[in-house]
Image (tube, rainbow, N blue to C red):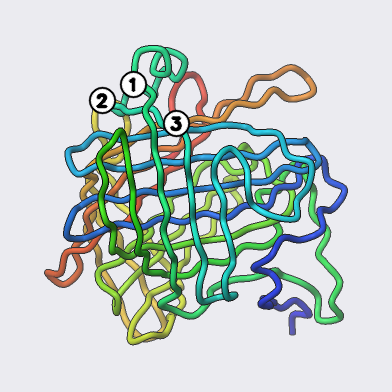
Amino acid sequence: MSDIEIRLEPQDEFNHEPDEASNYNESMYFNVFDHEKKMGGWFRLGNRPNEGYAEMTCCIYLPDGRIGFMFGRPEISTNEFFDAGGMKFEVLEPFKSLRVQYKGKILLLDNPKDMLNPSKAFKENPRVECEADINISGISPMFGGQAVRKDGTSLETDPEKSFSKAHYEQHTSGKGTIKVNGEEWTVDGLGLRDKSWGPRYWQAIEWYRWLTININDEIGFMFSIVHQSEDSERRGGIVLKDGKYESIKDCKIDTQYDDDNFQKTFTAWARTDHDEYEVKGRVLSLIPLRNRRNTPDGESLVTRITEGMTEYTYNGIVGYGMSEYLDQVVDGKPIGP
């Protein structure tokens, strides 16, 4: 019998004392999509206190297909809270109620694929004012936590090969307002949030596929395929049904790509202990992002992350969410299937 268990406590909603790893990261992520307006966005703050900065990302999908995007690495001196670069996350009641705010500039992209060349995109597209203020409510149980030994001790991890030591997710609803360049929308939608902490390099995983799906407030999914190496691939996720989670025991995603190797349509299949599920996805609007890091040996590593607002269909019912595909780029091409 394993002496490892998954633990999650209400205090984990608040920030932890960083460990000594130079690449310690503590991050929160939220997405929300209004099914009637066919718009929404996602928001992320990743504190890297031992490196002295945070990763801040704001991405807004507008009803006409334009995308507003901003990324920054604002300086931080503490990991006590999430508040950097104009973005702020507050825990109002652990596991139940949170608040997401952003106020600052955003790059307004008529053609989101311009971000294939970020420096050119930032020079040639307008930066406009953006405000978002959204109250997030949990509509599901919590999924995940930290793997620890039953005596409470942490597992040993290699910071160089780590993506996180703890991670949890939850399906949510979101209500609030989004303003972009003088236009304002009232948002009343559904989404998913997650939190993780521990050492992280974006290059620690060869590729992954992450689908977050809200069909309605009673049916939702999260599909996850994480491929760390030829000898290590994890397939799983969750099904939200009647207010409860079922764990996905196996899943697969068959993807059709466009000419730029971005996900366009796909069919996702999953099996739980009780049932099988098939969900079809169609990307409505997509932005390609990247992360770069130089190793101590001087090798340049490039990670591509494609973020697609996606229309999902399950049993004839249409919902919305995200498809996030991460790939390491080798010889100019993403390496995932």
Against 244, residue 318 (above or below) is above
Q: Position of residue 61 (x, y in %)?
A: 29, 43
Residue holding disc 2: 111
CA distance separating discs 1 and 2: 6 Å
Name the kind of residue labelled 1 in the image: Asp
Name the kind of residue labelled 3 in the image: Lys
Q: Please report whichever mark, 3 or 2, sits nearer to the chain's N-terminal start.
A: 3
- Tell me whether circle 1 and circle 3 mark residues in contact (CB < 8 Å): no
Q: Is residue 72 left or right of residue 242?
A: right
**Front one among 232 and 20:** 20
- At x 36%, y 59%, the residue is 252
Q: Position of residue 25 (x, y in %)?
A: 70, 48
Against 291, residue 84 (above or below) is below
- At x 29%, y 47%, the residue is 309
Res 6 seen here = no
- At x 35%, y 52%, the residue is 322
Q: Position of residue 161 (x, y in %)?
A: 72, 44
Residues packed near mark 2 inside 10 Å, few (<14), some (14 to 19) or many (20 plus): some
**Front one among 286 and 187:** 187
Residue 253: name its quadrant: bottom left
Residues packed near mark 3 inside 10 Å, few (<14), some (14 to 19) or many (20 plus): many
Residue holding disc 3: 105
| Residue that sits furthest to the left in the current view | 316
Residue holding disc 1: 114
CA distance separating discs 3 and 2: 18 Å
Q: Is residue 268 left or right of residue 82?
A: left
Say what secondary structure mark 2 lies in. Answer: loop
Q: Is residue 145 left or right of residue 289?
A: right
